[in-house]
């Protein structure tokens, strides 16, 4: 008996679509329903309609974590992007020890986030930390990095920038993909180095920048492990380092408010979707695809 | 097949084959005739080893005759994992929990009631100090049994007391005395930076008990239905904290706390003699014995607002049986074994904790790693001993209490206003919880 092609196709792709149904689409549908319920995990969910969403709109902690996450995203994404492009551009030059420099920049990316967080907790210790020791050497009394509401967020943003190996490697690959002929043409036209960077490198790199920015937006809105470990799972001084996913986690697994946490998850999904859509819309005239 | 493909097959196939041959398999060390009791516990290291010894002894003796095998696993975040496993219908048979989750878990129906079990197995309430038995109860039922109990006392540095002209044999007994002593023990450098503090009720220098202060002003935060923070006692507590803070100066105090180091660990400021008095449990002597064995210190009950009423914070690790456990009878049989006085005291001693029993033998005190264990033990007998508030929504309330303390310590809000706001927030949490519980009850057939 001859098995129809479409059955064969379904069979061979079944690991993916079975996984998709059971581990993604199914849980998402359940989570959408639970966001309309009060569900303390061990008792049956009680349907409450849009109550969870209405409560979120008046929850001051929700507003705080929303603002914190937004601040984190607004500063860490541009900072990370600029630094990663700058480093990639430098590492793209043919200098001695190029491989070592590349490895050094990439190594923090392969270190587990928890280890990174713990190392930085020590580095930022106001008394014994290397950062303040260094500042003291030049006569500056360093701040109480993680203990002060004013500096805690800044510290986290700076630490997040330390882990830019992955986007940097992607930028590096993007740089190497830009045809040398374009630079030659620009030089013949009298373009300076800055001009070449602005009119050749950036447009050539724009699809890669778009990709990295979208990924960074998603990562920034989901930031969890770094502040969770560095702030010892507390909301930080004046809740200044309490992020969206941390509050979601607390609601789900500490306070057993699964319905409320599900509503938060759907709002987070909507925010990420909207921001990604916005980035795509804005970037339409700025991103240049070769051959397009 | 090319050499490259051969190499690839070996590279991928060899680890798979090794994994199949030597990887995780069914446990061979469990005799076939045993009922396996899965026991999840939070303890690892020395504490875990102490429990493992007892488990092994049980498996080799009582377990052998009664065909029970206890499978001990050290689990991090044991409360969360137990909860998720219970919700998923595959909980352990015994869970070693923290006492502060009992009300939450019991109210959600996550734990089995143990009243009948303890009666049947002859575990008697009368054998235990009331506070330790009471800690495992919720709304008149027993849900947990004490495993490693402790009270929290005032550790004070006798050398620093002498240096400040204070009598090291007379530690503070009231909150007023604590304030006075604290002021005398505070030292600053030429720039006004605090180089040595007396007592600071800040989260960084406390560990886990940021919510506890109103109790030492005779407040009780939960009356069974309402959270009672905004009371004269509650308000007085936070006014006192704000007053202490003002004396130290908020920036100077914050700077000291940020540089003092965490209370858990080698940077402990009490060990480095930067903090003269600290609120801690009996295990702290282990840290002192390890890192600063020559430290001249003593232990006393933590002061209360009056001398007459000695409020004592008591807490305990507990054993509980999650709902849906497959072998509750066998699990209780094991717990009955562990709750024999000689066995449990062996465990408590190894953990540097107290004995939960009403009559404690000399053998327990002799050689206990904390030479002040009798002080801690006497404190547990105080009629004003208290545990965590038995409110199912305590975790959420506790976060608000932390925020309140931080607000007062950082001078962000007026203490009375902060207390009022916190009361309102926790009222809303309690109200919502009660409403949903009522709705859920109404929907039940």
Image: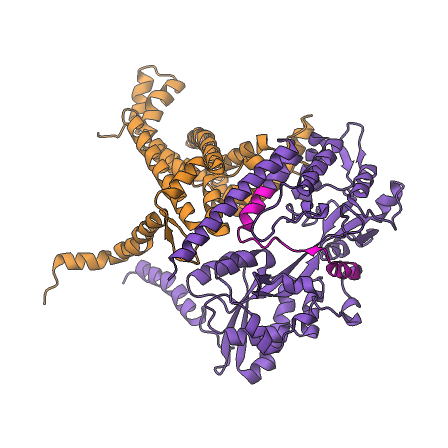
B3, A128: nearer the viewer: A128
Give residue B423's quadrant in the image.
top right
User: Can you see residue A147?
Assistant: no
The furthest residue to the bottom: B65
Colour that chain A carries in the picture? orange
Task: Give the residue at x 58% y 32%.
Answer: A149
Q: Position of residue A264 (x, y in %)?
A: 40, 42
Task: Give the residue at x 53% y 50%.
Answer: B393
Q: Is residue B159 left or right of residue B332?
A: right
Give residue B63's quadrant in the image.
bottom right
Give the vertical position of A29 relative to A289 (above or below).
below
The furthest residue to the left: A1
Numbered range of the magenta stretch: B373-401
Quarter of the figure with the N terminus of chain B: bottom left
Q: Position of residue B263 (x, y in %)?
A: 69, 47
Q: Position of residue B189 (x, y in %)?
A: 80, 31
Colour that chain B carries in the picture? purple
Q: Is residue A33 one of those drawn in magenta? A: no
Task: Give the residue at x 29% y 28%.
Answer: A281
User: Can you see residue B373?
Assistant: yes
Q: Position of residue A284 (x, y in %)?
A: 27, 27
A148, B432: nearer the viewer: B432
Q: Is residue B107 left or right of residue A286?
A: right
Give residue A186's quadrant in the image.
top left
């Amino acid at each position: 008996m001859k098995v129809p092609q479409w059955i064969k196709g379904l069979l061979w792709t079944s690991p993916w679509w079975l996984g998709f149904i059971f581990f993604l689409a199914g849980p998402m549908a359940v989570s959408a329903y639970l966001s309309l319920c009060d569900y303390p995990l061990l008792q049956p969910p009680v349907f409450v309609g849009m109550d969870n969403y209405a409560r979120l709109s008046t929850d001051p902690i929700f507003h705080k974590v929303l603002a914190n996450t937004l601040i984190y995203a607004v500063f860490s994404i541009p900072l990370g992007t600029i630094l990663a492009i700058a480093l990639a551009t430098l590492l793209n030059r043919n200098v001695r020890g190029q491989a070592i420099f590349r490895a050094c920049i990439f190594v923090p990316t392969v270190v587990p986030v928890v280890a990174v967080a713990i190392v930085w907790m020590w580095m930022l210790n106001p008394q014994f930390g290397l950062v303040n020791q260094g500042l003291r050497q030049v006569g500056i009394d360093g701040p109480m990095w993680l203990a002060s509401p004013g500096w805690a967020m800044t510290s986290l943003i700076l630490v997040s920038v330390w882990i830019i190996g992955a986007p940097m490697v992607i930028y590096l690959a993007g740089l190497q993909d830009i045809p040398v002929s374009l630079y030659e043409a620009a030089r013949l036209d009298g373009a300076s180095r800055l001009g070449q960077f602005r009119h050749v490198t950036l447009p050539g790199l724009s699809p890669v920048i778009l990709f990295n920015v979208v990924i960074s937006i998603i990562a920034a809105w989901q930031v969890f492990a770094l502040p969770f470990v560095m702030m010892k799972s507390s909301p930080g001084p004046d809740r200044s380092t309490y992020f969206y996913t941390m509050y979601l986690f607390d609601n789900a697994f500490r306070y057993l408010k699964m319905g409320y946490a599900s509503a938060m998850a759907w709002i987070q999904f909507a925010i990420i979707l909207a921001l990604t859509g916005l980035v795509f819309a804005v970037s339409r005239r700025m991103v240049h695809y070769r051959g397009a | 097949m090319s050499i490259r493909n051969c190499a690839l097959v070996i590279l991928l196939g060899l680890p798979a084959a090794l994994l199949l041959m030597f990887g995780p398999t069914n446990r061979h060390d469990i005799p076939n005739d045993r009922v396996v009791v899965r026991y999840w516990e939070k303890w690892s290291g020395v504490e875990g080893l102490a429990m493992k010894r007892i488990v092994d002894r049980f498996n080799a003796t009582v377990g052998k005759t009664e065909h029970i095998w206890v499978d001990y696993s050290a689990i991090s975040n044991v409360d969360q994992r137990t909860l998720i496993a219970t919700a998923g219908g595959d909980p352990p048979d015994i869970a070693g929990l923290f006492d502060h989750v009992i009300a939450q878990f019991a109210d959600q129906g996550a734990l089995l009631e143990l009243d009948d079990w303890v009666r049947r197995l002859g575990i008697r309430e009368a054998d235990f100090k009331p506070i330790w038995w009471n800690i495992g109860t919720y709304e008149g039922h027993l849900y947990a049994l004490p495993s490693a109990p402790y009270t929290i006392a005032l550790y004070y540095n006798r050398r620093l007391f002498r240096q400040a002209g204070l009598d090291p044999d007379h530690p503070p007994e009231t909150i007023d005395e604590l304030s006075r002593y604290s002021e005398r023990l505070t030292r600053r450098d030429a720039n006004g930076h605090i180089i040595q503090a007396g007592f600071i009720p800040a989260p960084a220098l406390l560990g886990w008990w940021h919510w506890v202060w109103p109790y030492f002003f005779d407040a009780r935060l939960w009356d069974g239905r309402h959270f009672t923070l905004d009371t004269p006692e509650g308000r007085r507590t936070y006014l006192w904290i704000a007053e202490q803070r003002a004396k130290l100066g908020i920036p100077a105090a914050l700077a000291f706390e940020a540089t003092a180091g965490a209370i858990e660990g080698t940077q402990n400021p009490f060990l480095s003699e930067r903090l003269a008095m600290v609120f801690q449990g009996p295990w702290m002597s282990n840290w002192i014995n390890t890192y600063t064995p020559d430290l001249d210190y003593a232990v006393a009950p933590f002061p209360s607002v009056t001398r007459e009423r000695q409020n004592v914070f008591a807490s305990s690790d507990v054993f509980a049986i999650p709902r849906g456990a497959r072998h509750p009878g066998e699990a209780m049989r094991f717990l009955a074994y562990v709750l024999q006085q000689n066995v449990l005291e062996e465990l408590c001693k190894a953990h540097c904790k107290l004995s939960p029993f009403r009559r404690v033998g000399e053998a327990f005190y002799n050689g206990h790693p904390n030479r002040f264990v009798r002080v801690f033990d006497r404190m547990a007998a105080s009629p004003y001993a208290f545990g965590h508030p038995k409110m199912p929504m305590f975790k959420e309330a506790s976060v608000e209490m932390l925020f309140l303390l931080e607000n007062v310590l950082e001078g962000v809000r007026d203490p009375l206003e902060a207390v009022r706001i916190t009361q309102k927030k926790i009222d809303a949490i309690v109200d919502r919880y009660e409403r949903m519980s009522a709705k859920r009850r109404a929907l039940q057939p």
